[in-house]
Amino acid sequence: MKVYFRYLVLFQIGDFKRTVRDTEHNLKICDIVGNYAENEEDKKEILQYRPYILRMNAVSRACIMR
């Protein structure tokens, strides 16, 4: 949760490089949960946020490129 709140603030202040770093961190956590969680409910609880994290990552990358 701390990384989530941090990348929200970083995005708001325009620190897109660190937003990309933090969203990549959370995407790696999603990969670990998706591959190794034994309980399907645990997977659903975490992986429901993956599309949002991907969007934040993509928008931040686009902001860096402009």
Image: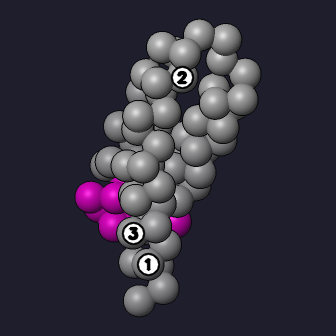
Residue at mark 3 to residue at mark 1: CA–CA distance: 5 Å
The span shown in magenta is: 10-17
Q: Residue under circle 2?
A: 43
Q: Residue at x 55, y 16 (%)?
A: 40
Relative to 36, is 49 on the left or the right?
Answer: left
Q: Residue at x 40, y 58 (%)?
A: 56
Q: Residue at x 49, y 72 (%)?
A: 61
N-term-proximal mark, 3 vs 2: 2
Q: Residue under circle 3?
A: 59
- Above or below, 9 against 45 in this view is below
Q: Nearer the viewer, residue 55 or 6?
A: 55
N-term-proximal mark, 1 vs 2: 2
Magenta stretch: includes residue 14: yes
Magenta stretch: includes residue 30: no
Name the quadrant of the C terminus: bottom left
Magenta stretch: dominant SS? helix
The amino acid type found where label 3 is placed reads Val
